[in-house]
Amino acid sequence: MRIGVNALYLIPGGVGGTEIYLRSLLAALARVDQTNEYFVFTNRETGADLVPEKFTQVPCGVDAVFRPARILYEQFVLPARGPKVDVLFNPGFTAPVAHPNNVTVFHDLQHKRHPEYFRWFDLPFWNALLWASVRRSRRLIAVSEATRDDLQKFYGAASTVVHHGADPAFFEIAKERSPEDFFLCVSTLHPHKNIERLVRAFAIYGKSRLVLAGMKGFQTEAVERQIQSLDIADRVRVTGWIPREELLDLYRRAKGFLYPSTFEGFGMPVIEALAAEVPLACSDIEPMRSLAAGDAILFDPLRDEAVTEAFVRLETAKPRSNERIRREFTWEQAARRTLEVLNA
């Protein structure tokens, strides 16, 4: 087959976990698939490092940072943009409705579950574009059972679950761990990530340090104001998006990992922390409850005192073996299961 990959959505350092997903999956597909041809459609911001050597990069004349232009290009230019492909893989929610054979990935349905987290002028476009993606895709991929259930509930659409994997580098970290006196949270600073409550709980906890690593999102200013108002700026670091090696080093040195999100489609940092054997506390919600599977401290993310208690419990928590993650969450498995859907 000639497989197209619609990477027009990718803004390096600007789309959070879906960037890690695409980079990791493409690399794994290059390792496991020796049969099919791949054509990766990229925007002007995408660097050459996204596309594996054996794949063909197809540069497109559009800037993804201006979303309206990117969407118009995706809908009206991409379907006719050469070379012709047998199937178009859309890893970032949206698909060109005119293409005859779309396979589209849904990472979550936050626009349905929590529309209050969207700007009023963005929400109608999310609703329209994702509805069209569901209706004009021959097959859908959900990244978790929770997202699969939401696709069925809100759209009456069947999908195939393909979990994310863990970067092999995290398994190596487990062998090199050198814990220091700080807790780590890897998360985009968006409202549903619940970072304000995490900061309040940390202030009550009153010890150690906290590193908030991840893309600066819609809640960044509120989080930074709160850190200042609680007088804990000397103990809390907000990194913004950082290079992969720096992020891996934080996992290597953190004494504990907290993930307080109130909504997730998958929860990749949970898998990464487990792979690195960092003691983990995360929200008692799906899909994280199933991902952690008895290997994490679970807490109610809507109660400040529960999050504070998670800090206390992590002080003495022991790392768990990552063998289950090695078996169940690899990018090679994700690549093979994605290929099954593309070939169906």
Image (cartoon, rainbow, N blue to C red):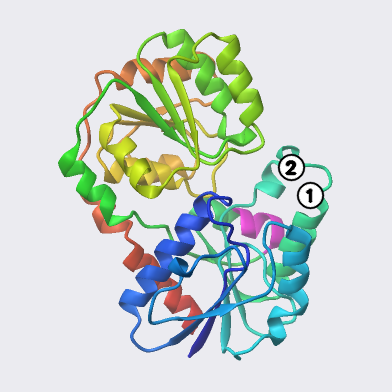
Q: Dot 2 lies on which element?
A: loop
User: Does the image show residue 97?
Assistant: yes
Residues at marks 2 and 1 touching, judged by CB atoms closer than 8 Å:
yes
Q: Give the amino acid type for the residue marked by disc 1 in the picture.
A: Asp
Q: Is residue 155 magenta?
A: yes
Counting labels gives 2
- In the image, residue 275 sits, relative to residue 96, either above or below, namely above
Residue 141 on image: x %, y %: 54, 66
- In the image, residue 282 sits, relative to residue 88, either above or below, namely above
Looking at this view, name the residue that lies furthest to the left: 175
Q: Residues within 10 Å of mark 2 (few under 14, many from 20)?
A: some
Magenta residues span: 150-156
Q: Could you say which is closer to the camera, residue 233 or residue 291?
A: 233
Which residue is found at the position 69% from the left and 79% from the top? 78
Name the image quarter holding residue 159. bottom right
Name the image quarter holding residue 149. bottom right
Residue 20 on image: x %, y %: 45, 56
Residue 233 on image: x %, y %: 50, 15
Q: Magenta span: helix, strand or loop, mainly? A: helix
Which of the numbered marks, if any, corresponds to residue 337? none
Q: Which residue is mark 2?
A: 118
Q: Residues within 10 Å of mark 1 (few under 14, many from 20)?
A: few
Name the image quarter holding residue 314. top left
Which of the numbered marks, if any, corresponds to residue 122? 1
- In the image, residue 243 sits, relative to residue 45, either above or below, namely above
Q: Could you say which is closer to the camera, residue 202 or residue 68?
A: 68
Judge left or right: residue 168 versus residue 125.
Answer: left
Q: Is residue 251 magenta?
A: no
User: Does the image show residue 131?
Assistant: no
Which residue is found at the position 67% from the left and 61% from the top? 64
